[in-house]
Amino acid sequence: MPEAVVAITGASGALYAERLLRALSDADWDILLIVTREGAINLDLELGLSPSDLGKLKGVSLEENGNLAARSASGSAKIDHYIICPASGTTIGKLAAGISDNLVTRSAMVALKERRPLIVVPREAPYATIHLENMTKLSSWGVVVLPASPGFYSKPETIDDLVDFVVARILDQMNIEHQLGKRWTGEEVQ
Ligand SMILES: Cc1cc2nc3c(=O)[nH]c(=O)nc-3n(C[C@H](O)[C@H](O)[C@H](O)COP(=O)(O)O)c2cc1C
């Protein structure tokens, strides 16, 4: 099975992570899930869920953010994709500075050093200049910076439609087939 690390950090937008995990689970991916302390606060605040609730999804194994000896901390673990969703400004700043002081930042550093695909999904408004500088740095290193900013051209009717728009873009980056939302055909504007 293909395998991904999914990290939930302390930015708003836990619903993006929950729907991403369900989509990866449905696509038969194995997932190592890491949730930071503030990530868990937002998960509870926004969805009434705990990390262990998400850990019950098929294919999902929880790793402890404080455990730097966990599997995802090593480059020798063959992991296909790394996604930080949502990604806080703090975690992005640590990555840009080369800091790997917890399992989220360490596993992302593994992705960087091993030249493996890493997607970060920032959620902040407005951005400070340091956020923009840090994201530019990550992007120049090959990281896909995929902001939680849904488009409206697909005429979303529900919050799930909006969330699916962003999750669909993540799955596209991972080359995973999905049915989330309609694709642009070029015939919408006459
Ligand atoms: C309820 C709550 C909501 C937050 N929302 C955001 C946010 O949307 N974006 C962001 O970058 N930081 C947000 N923060 C701040 C981060 O959680 C904070 O910078 C924290 O240090 C991030 O640590 P982590 O990256 O290890 O999770 C929020 C914090 C809390 C408690």
Image (cartoon, helix red, strand yellow):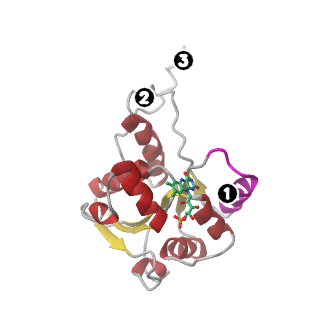
What amino acid type should be assigned to the residue bearing mark 1?
Met
Of the two numbered discs 1 and 3 in the rendering, the one whose residue sits closer to the viewer = 1
Badge 1 crowding class, 10 Å Cα cut-off, few under 14, some 14 to 19, many 20 or more, is: many
According to the picture, the residue beneath numbered tag 2 turns out to be 156
Quadrant of the rendered image containing residue 113? bottom right
What amino acid type should be assigned to the residue bearing mark 2?
Pro
What amino acid type should be assigned to the residue bearing mark 3?
Val
Is 10 left or right of 45, judged from the image as shown? right
Quadrant of the rendered image containing residue 2? bottom left
Main secondary structure type of the part rendered in magenta: helix
Q: How many marks?
A: 3
Q: Which residues are magenta?
A: 125-140
Residue 189, labelled with which disc?
3
Q: Is residue 178 magenta?
A: no
According to the picture, the residue beneath numbered tag 1 turns out to be 135
Instruction: Determine the residue positioned at 47% across, 80% down.
Output: 73
Badge 2 crowding class, 10 Å Cα cut-off, few under 14, some 14 to 19, many 20 or more, is: some
**Looking at the picture, how far across and down is residue 165, in whole percent?**
45, 39
The quarter of the image holding the N terminus is bottom left
